[in-house]
Image (spheres, grey):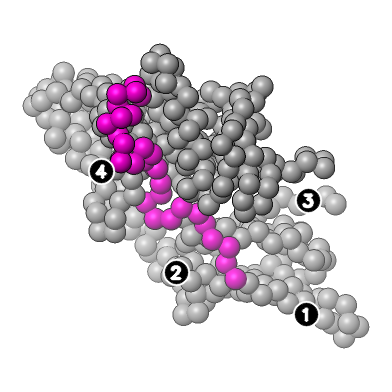
Amino acid sequence: MHRARKRRFIPSADTSIIKMAAQCQEATLQQVEQLWAMLDDMLQSDPESYRTFIQHQLKEGADLYSPPQPNYCLRTRILEPEEGWLYINVCGWRRVPPPQSPSHPVPLFGGRLETVTEGQDTYHVLDVAFNPEVIHEAVEDGEDGQLPQLALSYAQQQHKLRLSEHYTLDSASLKGSLKSLWHRLTFLQKPTDPEGSLPHGHSPGPTLLQQISTLRGRQTENGDDFAVALTAQQQDRLKGKALIQVISSTETTQPRQPDHELTLVAGPDGSPMRVHLTVHLPGVHSVSECQLSISQDDVVVEVEDLYHFHLPLPVVVKEEEATAIFKKKKQTLFVSMPVL
């Protein structure tokens, strides 16, 4: 069946949303003007700090958006809860910080566990990322066997799996494609502070403006203060301490599947005329938080960090005539779609 191009729209809402958007835009413009003023001031009063700051921001930006680089792929057997094959792609990623010191846990970033079916074969794929310096140092020190153990331990703890004690290195360095790896690592969560999740009420890191203010009259700190090593002596010192530090989202680890009801409204002749869909979204208080996509044969509802809902429709609908209303009091999204 030909799939119509999806369109994305926001359900009906009052003008307060437009006013809020205008206020946010005005605040952003004010911050940009303040930013330029501070940069001009820094350039005039302390050109060296200005140069250092710009170089630091460019390097951080390049590191932040550089994709993960696959190093090798582990293959092991899932024993519980259901038997099957598990492939773990071990990657280097600049978004993951190195350990703060040799006595600190090794930070890692894990993607979502995905089940893949190819013909008659079904297997599971998980991506685990370390800072590239950690991987490099582990190889140089002859301790590269430590990282697979950390990856396997993470898979068992995070996804409640019991794995075989034995694993092999797959012939390919990556199971799947770079695109699917990127999607699994970035779809659900983003790296945050090296200390892990920020508790509620904890202030985030310094803003760009705050960084500029603190840089006036002094040089930035050396960005190479982290010592990375996985020697046997360091592993002994870490006994009794957590070896893994998981870099997780500041709010949730996985979007949930919301409850929903689907109703087919029949016409006088008994054939379906409309499809009514109600999606319950507890915790959602504004229509602006919802992203809704409708095609002829499916519906997708997304709320960042909270919900991901995909529903194939039992009949073909006229997506261009669909309507949607978000009911704030009940925290539900109601979608009505005429049948094609």
Return the residue at label 3.
Answer: 3
Q: Residue 293: x percent and y percent? A: 63, 57
Does the image show residue 8?
A: yes
Q: Residues within 10 Å of mark 4 (few under 14, many from 20)?
A: few
Which mark lies nearer to you, 4 or 3?
4
Return the residue at label 1.
Answer: 265
The residue positioned 52% from the left and 69% from the top of the image is 281
Q: Tell me if 144 is positioned left or right of 312 in this view.
A: left
The residue positioned 46% from the left and 80% from the top of the image is 329
Return the residue at label 4.
Answer: 205
Q: Residue 241: x percent and y percent? A: 30, 41
Q: Earlier in the sequence, mark 1 or mark 4?
A: 4
Type of amino acid at the residue the image marks with label 4: Gly
Q: Is residue 242 magenta?
A: yes
Does the image show residue 187?
A: no
Element at label 1: strand
Q: Earlier in the sequence, mark 2 or mark 3?
A: 3
Please state the extent of the stretch shown in magenta in the rendering: 230-259
Along the line of sight, which residue is nearer the eye, 30 or 150? Answer: 150
Image height of 226 relative to 262, above or below = above
Return the residue at label 2.
Answer: 283
C-alpha distance separating marks 4 and 3: 44 Å
Q: Earlier in the sequence, mark 2 or mark 4?
A: 4
Q: Residues within 10 Å of mark 1 (few under 14, many from 20)?
A: some
The residue positioned 29% from the left and 24% from the top of the image is 233
